[in-house]
């Protein structure tokens, strides 16, 4: 397509801040290399818990203005990562944060968890057929840790990829597009264990406590990992993006905590599992580029196609 870089990456996330925690280094690296990086966030994160006391009034059980505030946080985070194409699914506020599983927020009007799957996917089809990404990154079927919005984001991303490729789907007038490769966010268990060991040794008192390895979404046995992206050169951008989400994240050097005040490591090498498409490495080998093996992405980064 004219006026689009040769490499085009789409990430689908549930709430503002998920992208920076999971993929901030990857996004910054590809944006710096000239790829077109598109982020679609499915909700405003209205039900999030607020860390700074002076912003506690934003919470859903008080002023209920956290969502609008987090729009600004996301924009600031994307500036840190160099990402200029970030959107909300169906427009800002189209779908509301569903809260944790089993709560009353799951079924309140507009909750993403209750969204019609094909309707929500249709909004994403418009993005896919417009941007025409070769690579999609999202969650596994459990959403990484069972949050309703993460599970729904997986379902919507998967369904939208199917519909976008289907010539018979005419709710979106643009030409069909097939995404070459789909990845799920992952963290290899050994990497997580080593990072938590460093946290316990070097900064045991940075936060109120230290999280457990299995508190990290997407931790799997190392054999599940098919790709690793070294974003260490963009570590500062990732941590700056995480700091921009100040209502949700507290950052202390290479570690961070959410509202539970339990320390976790910041990963600057990020890991993925290829679940659709042809691997770009040899048999059993990890990929070090999400675009590996994608023919029309073989041009130099930043080239137009």
Image (cartoon, rainbow, N blue to C red):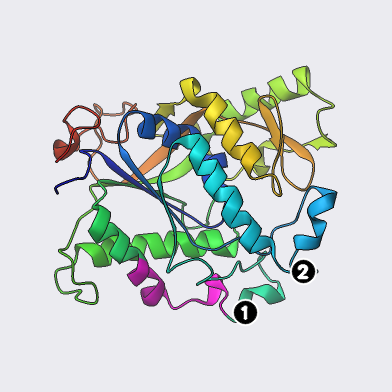
Q: Pointer 1: what residue?
A: 107
Q: Residue 286, image x and y in percent?
A: 34, 27
Q: Nearer the viewer, residue 9 or 214?
A: 9
Question: Farthest residue in the top direction?
Answer: 202
Q: Could you say whether the residue bearing mark 1 is in a helix, strand or loop?
A: helix
Q: Who's the residue at 37% across and 34% down the image? A: 31
Q: Nearer the viewer, residue 289 or 272?
A: 289
Q: Who's the residue at 62% across and 55% down the image? A: 70
Q: How packed is label 1: few (under 14 Cα within 10 Å), some, or many (20 or more)?
A: some
Q: Relative to residue 275, is residue 74 drawn left or right?
A: right
Q: Is residue 218 visible?
A: no
| Above or below 74: residue 231 | above
Foreground label between 1 and 2: 2
Query: Main SS of the magenta segment?
Result: helix
Q: How packed is label 2: few (under 14 Cα within 10 Å), some, or many (20 or more)?
A: few
Q: Residue 30, image x and y in percent?
A: 36, 33
Q: Could you say whether the residue bearing mark 2 is in a helix, strand or loop?
A: loop
Q: Residue 187, image x and y in percent?
A: 52, 36
| Quarter of the image with the C terminus in it | top left
Q: Is residue 13 visible?
A: yes
Q: Residue 43, image x and y in percent?
A: 54, 63
| Above or below 224: residue 161 | below
Q: Earlier in the sequence, mark 1 or mark 2?
A: 2
Residue 63 got which mark? Answer: 2
- Magenta part of the chain: 110-123
């Amino acid at each position: 397509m004219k006026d689009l870089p040769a490499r085009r990456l789409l990430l689908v996330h549930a709430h503002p801040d998920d992208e920076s925690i999971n993929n901030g280094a990857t996004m910054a690296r590809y944006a710096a290399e000239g790829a077109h990086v598109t982020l679609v966030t499915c909700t405003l994160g209205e039900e999030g818990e607020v860390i700074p006391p002076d912003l506690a009034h934003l919470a859903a059980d008080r002023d209920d203005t956290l969502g609008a505030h987090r729009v600004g946080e996301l924009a600031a985070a994307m500036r840190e990562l160099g990402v200029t194409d970030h959107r909300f699914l169906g427009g800002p506020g189209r779908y509301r944060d569903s809260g944790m599983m089993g709560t009353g927020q799951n079924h309140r009007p507009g909750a993403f968890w209750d969204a019609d799957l094909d309707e929500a996917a249709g909004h994403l089809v418009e993005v896919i057929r417009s941007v025409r990404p070769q690579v999609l990154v999202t969650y596994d079927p459990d959403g990484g840790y069972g949050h309703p919005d993460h599970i729904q984001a997986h379902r919507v991303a998967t369904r939208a990829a199917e519909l976008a490729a289907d010539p018979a789907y005419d709710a979106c007038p643009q030409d069909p597009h097939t995404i070459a490769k789909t990845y799920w966010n992952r963290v290899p268990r050994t990497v997580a264990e080593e990072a938590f060991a460093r946290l316990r040794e070097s900064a045991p008192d940075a936060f109120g406590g230290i999280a457990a390895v299995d508190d990290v979404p997407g931790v799997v046995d190392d054999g599940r990992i098919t790709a690793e992206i070294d974003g260490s050169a963009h570590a500062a951008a990732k941590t700056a993006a995480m700091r921009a989400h100040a209502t949700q994240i507290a950052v202390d050097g290479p570690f961070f905590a959410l509202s539970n005040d339990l320390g976790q490591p910041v990963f600057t090498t990020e890991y993925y599992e290829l679940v659709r498409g042809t691997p770009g490495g040899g048999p059993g080998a990890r990929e070090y580029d999400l675009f590996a093996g994608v023919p029309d992405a073989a041009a130099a980064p930043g080239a137009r196609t």
